[in-house]
Amino acid sequence: MQREEVVEYRSFDGAEVTAFLVRPSTSANSAVVVVHEIFGITDFIRNITRRLASLGYLAIAPNLYSRRANVFTEERITAVMRRFWSIPPERRASGEAVAELMRTLTVEEQEIVRELVVDRVKTEERMINDVVAAYNHVKETYGVSKVAVMGFCMGGGLAFEALTRVPFDAGVIYYGRNPRNLEDLAKVKGAILAIYAGEDPSINQGLPDLMRAVITYKPRFEMAFYPGTRHAFATEGGPVYNEAAAKDAWERTVNFLRKYLG
């Protein structure tokens, strides 16, 4: 029987990061670090972690909001980001538009906007370092020989960047942004499976540069592209969930992990 628990590990800055951990029913030789969407440790992320454990992997999903978990709840993040996304795309980079939004928010909601909009680069760097610390924790604590990383949406971009920082054996990127410096693909040890939605302009605009970098630096790279789907199509219960595409993407994910993790 699988065993679920909440564990803690120490990150790069000394902070304790909590994580949802699922141990498989048999001893695991490999592990997967699951990197959550912008909404945090949701039911979807917990279910993905459970699914991975059912395949025989130790699965761990760090809460990248651990330092301020009382503020960064799924409900509050969802409410705040929906209001931000209601701003027309061409105005979202405008300081004036963000200032207008901030004036309508509570102190806690303003903190979310600062972390996830205003100071996004700084926030993501901290999160990437937390993912790197998760890799180190898993390698040092659970006696596994191989470790993969899997991320969704914001977490896909974080996972892609983490692949360039530490030697994960494999990475599954669900509609995540490219690494900041595509030259860093040369540092990736593990194989990459990148999954994209057909109707996802903010992510897909980076694909031509990514393809050129893949040709130049030659990582082991596989890609699946799903026409007619939108960003977050694999999130069960989400507004753009596409069952057929999600099931196909998961089958590809399982086959990929079997190939590179065993």
Image (cartoon, grey):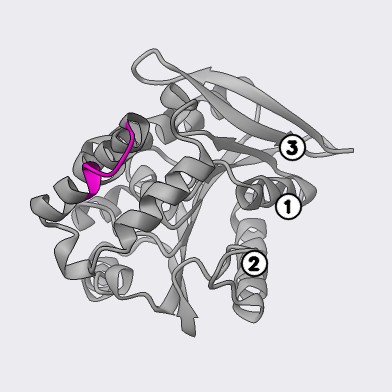
Disc 2 and disc 1: Cα gap in Å?
10 Å
Secondary element at image label 2: helix
Q: How crowded is mark 2: few (under 14 residues within 10 Å), some or many (20 or more)?
A: few
| Mark toward the viewer: 3 or 1 | 1
Q: In which quarter of the image is residue 124?
A: top left
Residue 88 numbered mark, or none: none
**Rendered position, 262 above or below 138:** below
**Rendered position, 232 above or below 68:** below
Q: State the image coordinates of residue 30 (x, y, percent, origin top left).
A: 66, 41
Question: Which residue ends up furthest to the top in the rendered image?
Answer: 14
Q: Quadrant of residue 31?
A: top right
| Main secondary structure of the magenta stretch | loop
Disc 2 and disc 3: Cα gap in Å?
20 Å
Observer-nearest of 30 and 202: 202
Magenta segment: does it hold 224?
no
Residue ID for mark 2 = 250
Q: Give the range drawn in magenta.
A: 101-106
Amino acid under label 2?
Trp
Position of residue 209 in the picture relative to residue 153 (left or right):
left
